[in-house]
Image (cartoon, rainbow, N blue to C red):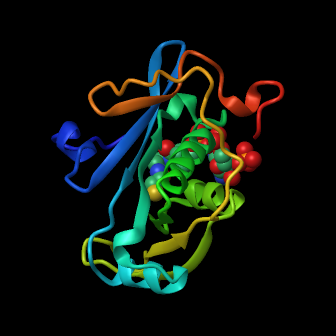
Amino acid sequence: MVWPDDPKAWLTAGTQICAFVAELDGVICGHVAVTRPKEGVAARAWAAELGAAVGDLLCVSLLFVDPQAQGCGVGRRLLDVAQAEILDRRAAPALEVVSLNTRAISLYEAQGWRRIGSVGYSWLPEPERSFLYVGPISTSARRPVNSRQQPAEGHRPASTGQPPMRDRPGMPG
Ligand SMILES: CC(C)(COP(=O)(O)OP(=O)(O)OC[C@H]1O[C@@H](n2cnc3c(N)ncnc32)[C@H](O)[C@@H]1OP(=O)(O)O)[C@@H](O)C(=O)NCCC(=O)NCCS
């Protein structure tokens, strides 16, 4: 795994609205943030597709799961929580994902996100693209019953010491 030189700065960019972490057995194993998009080609494309102003968009960002915890539903749970947060704020959901991130693309499409186009960036080697997605405007995601309500350094747990929600009987998947 390549970790940025300054992880704290990377995780707390100025455009961030809030963030959530997932815990398994008391250990943080995943992260997702909700951010405001920067003005630009991507934001204009999302806004046009959703019939929204750029200022009404919020993005799912910085979604990642510890490699040792991947494949257990944590990423899906984090995405659900971020998506629910965006809809609670009556904003329009958007995200972008580098074409190399095939697992993430599978996850987004399985959760009803729709690709609306792609953009190229100078930092992205050809032929890779950044795919633009818009999210569903309704969700079955529910707040975890065991969330701590108080943010810890701006990060809220998506699940606390419990297995991922989809592995728990009676919970939406
Ligand atoms: C993308 C990522 C967050 C998924 O987290 P995860 O906890 O492994 O995902 P889940 O276990 O919740 O799986 C949810 C879905 O992701 C997709 N997925 C997960 N592992 C996959 C794999 N090995 N191959 C293909 N798709 C996979 C599937 O659609 C899966 O649904 P399914 O279990 O019903 O088949 C994780 O792989 C990760 O951190 N990747 C590196 C960082 C990254 O690419 N972040 C996204 C940046 S935009």
Residue at x 66% of width, y 33% of height: 72
Q: Which of 81 and 102 is in front in this view?
A: 81
- Left or right of 84? Residue 12 is left
Query: Residue 102's x, y, as percent?
Result: 57, 60
Query: Residue 58's x, y, as percent?
Result: 41, 62
* Res 60 quadrant in image: bottom left
* Res 136 quadrant in image: bottom right
Query: Residue 162's x, y, as percent?
Result: 62, 18
Query: Residue 134's x, y, as percent?
Result: 55, 71
Residue at x 26% of width, y 28% of height: 153
Q: In which quarter of the image is the N terminus?
A: top left
Residue at the limit of the structure toward the right, as seen here = 170
- Left or right of 141? Residue 133 is left
Check the image and report above or below for 125 versus 100.
below
Q: How many labels does the image show?
A: 0
- Left or right of 152? Residue 70 is right
Q: In which quarter of the image is the C terminus?
A: top right
Q: Which of 104 and 157 is in front in this view?
A: 157
* Res 115 quadrant in image: bottom right
Q: Which of 90 and 117 is in front in this view?
A: 90
